[in-house]
Amino acid sequence: MPDSLIRLRRVLAAYLGFLAGSSFVRARNLARPAPFEQEAVIVFAAQDIKAYSQIVGSMIVLLPYPEDYVLEDMITQYTHAIDRWALVDIYRGMPITESMLSARGGSPMFDSP
């Protein structure tokens, strides 16, 4: 192996050794943070849901969520979202709220409370 490659390997090894002892690398290798003390379970979109489409079971999922951040409007039971209609586009990973859903299909103009 040429001398320049050997020197390059040594410099790289020294640099990586320096990083291994630095607080930057140690901070990146910390264990996952502890879960929140109080968690609620809310309904999230498991896939993109187009506006005015009916919600079926495969479109949603129940996931834990910090209780301090749960809004009144968020749906906490799986059955409260099934067979309802999306009023807006709901993207995968979004928490689903009551204001995003309608009891029946069609335009929100014709949806009575």
Image (cartoon, helix red, strand yellow):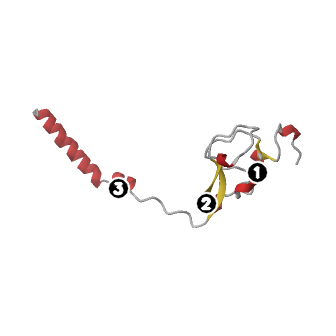
Where does residue 60 sit, x and y in percent of width and height? Answer: 66, 49
Question: Looking at the rendered structure, which numbered label has been put on residue 66?
Answer: 2
Q: Are the residues flagged by discs 3 and 2 in contact, CB closer than 8 Å? A: no
- Residue 51 horizontal/vertical position (percent): 73, 37
Return the residue at label 3. Answer: 26
**Residues packed near mark 3 inside 10 Å, few (<14), some (14 to 19) or many (20 plus):** few
Furthest residue in direction bottom, as rendered: 37
Is the Cβ of the residue at disc 2 closer than 8 Å to that at disc 1? no
Residue under the image location 75 percent in, 55 percent down: 80
* Position of residue 84 in the picture relative to residue 40 (left or right): right
Residue, x 24% and y 50% (percent of image)?
A: 17
Q: CA distance from mark 3 to mark 2?
A: 27 Å
For the residues marked 2 and 1, what is the alpha-carbon distance in whole angstroms?
18 Å
Q: Which mark is residue 55?
A: none
Which residue carries the number 1 mark?
Answer: 98
What type is the residue that disc 3 sits on? Arg
Secondary structure of residue under mark 1: helix
Q: Nearer the viewer, mark 2 or mark 1?
A: 1
Q: Upstream in the sequence, badge 3 or badge 1?
A: 3
Q: Which of marks 1 and 2 precedes in the sequence?
A: 2
Q: Position of residue 20 (x, y in %)?
A: 28, 52
112 left or right, relative to 68? right
Displayed quadrant of residue 5: top left
Binning the other alpha carbons within 10 Å of mark 1 as few (below 14), some (14 to 19) or many (20 upward) gives some
Secondary structure of residue under mark 3: helix
| Mark 2 surroundings within 10 Å by alpha-carbon count, few (fewer than 14), some (14 through 19), many (20 or more) | some
The residues bearing labels 3 and 1 have C-alpha atoms spaced at a distance of 43 Å
Q: Is residue 1 left or right of residue 60?
A: left
Q: Position of residue 36 (x, y in %)?
A: 56, 63
Q: Secondary structure at mark 2?
A: strand
Which amino acid lies under the numbered mark 1 shown in the image of this protein? Glu
Q: Amino acid at mark 2?
A: Pro
